[in-house]
Amino acid sequence: MLTEATEWIDWLEACRRMRAGVEQMLVDNPTTKLRAIELGRGEGGDRTLAVDAAAEDLIFAELDQLHADGMLFTAVSEERGEVDFGGGDVRVVIDPIDGSLNAKRCAGAVALSVAVANGPTVADVQFGFVHDFGMNEEWVASAGGGAWLNGSLLDPSLPARRSSDGKLEIIGIESTNPVLVTQASSRLEGKVHRLRALGAIAVTLCQVAAARSDAMVSLGPCRSVDAAAAQLVVREAGGFVSFPAFDQPLAAPLDLLPHSPVAAGRDLAALELVAAIPQFTPAQ
């Protein structure tokens, strides 16, 4: 169980070592030709790029060492699926490269995302780490301990901003398949002034945490590896998060299935607005 501050400090140091390794791997593969090499499909269902697999190898080497040092947990990773490191209640949810398409094209938001939880759902996440390699920004949160950007505490009082006609000024959208965007457009009209699409769910969530965006929503279902860490950053920074396919907003399980869209807002009204945008089948 994660019961003391020293526990998440240990995880923070481990995540920083993971970040350094992944960052160097990306530097060593600086072109689209190198980053576009595919190896098949991972456990999460997406095509696995060679850089995805290399990033995961670096992360699992760190997890192996943590386990050797006495930590017990189950890892949930986009490429390898669930890996037992001694069991127990702790789950470590990893997206080695959030924004794989951006990484492949050497452009835009690319991040490492790691969440540590005491139980099986998003509500149980106790520690979140997101490092955006594109902006060189480290986002960290611990349950009850606030959210931090590059070592500075984020202000939980920052509101959603609205234009004079009541529209949310900026929202982030993810899962931007053209069909989903077309379906959502009528529900956005008259409610939102501008859209931003970064191509990385964790990074887009973090923009809400810093009030750079007033809200965000994925137009299609996402997996816990995409959002588990960043949703804690948002909530500890004073924002609100929901996985709207579930009756309880944070009931999404920490597994590899795409159960629900994710939505976030700087206030509850902003969250409710964007959570109603995607069309989905409620989770059973």
Image (cartoon, rainbow, N blue to C red):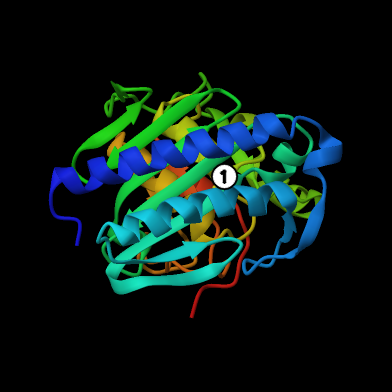
Farthest bottom residue in view: 284
Q: Quadrant of the N terminus?
A: bottom left
- For the point 49% across and 37% down, the residue is 19
Residue situated in front as seen by the camera: 211 or 277? 211
Count residues near mark 1 (Cα–Cα under 10 Å), then give few for <14, some for 14-19, many for 20+. Answer: many
What residue type is disc 1 on? Ile
- For the point 75% across and 31% down, the residue is 106
Residue 35, horizontal then vertical, whole percent? 78, 41
Farthest left residue in view: 4
Residue situated in front as seen by the camera: 232 or 239? 232
Q: Which residue is mark 1?
A: 201
Residue 97, horizontal then vertical, whole percent? 60, 45
Instruction: Residue 140: tell me if it is visible.
Output: yes
Residue situated in front as seen by the camera: 55 or 95? 55
Residue 3, compared with residue 30, is above or below; it is below
SS assignment at label 1 = helix
Residue 236, horizontal then vertical, whole percent? 28, 39
Instruction: Residue 239: tell me if it is visible.
Output: no
Farthest right residue in view: 33
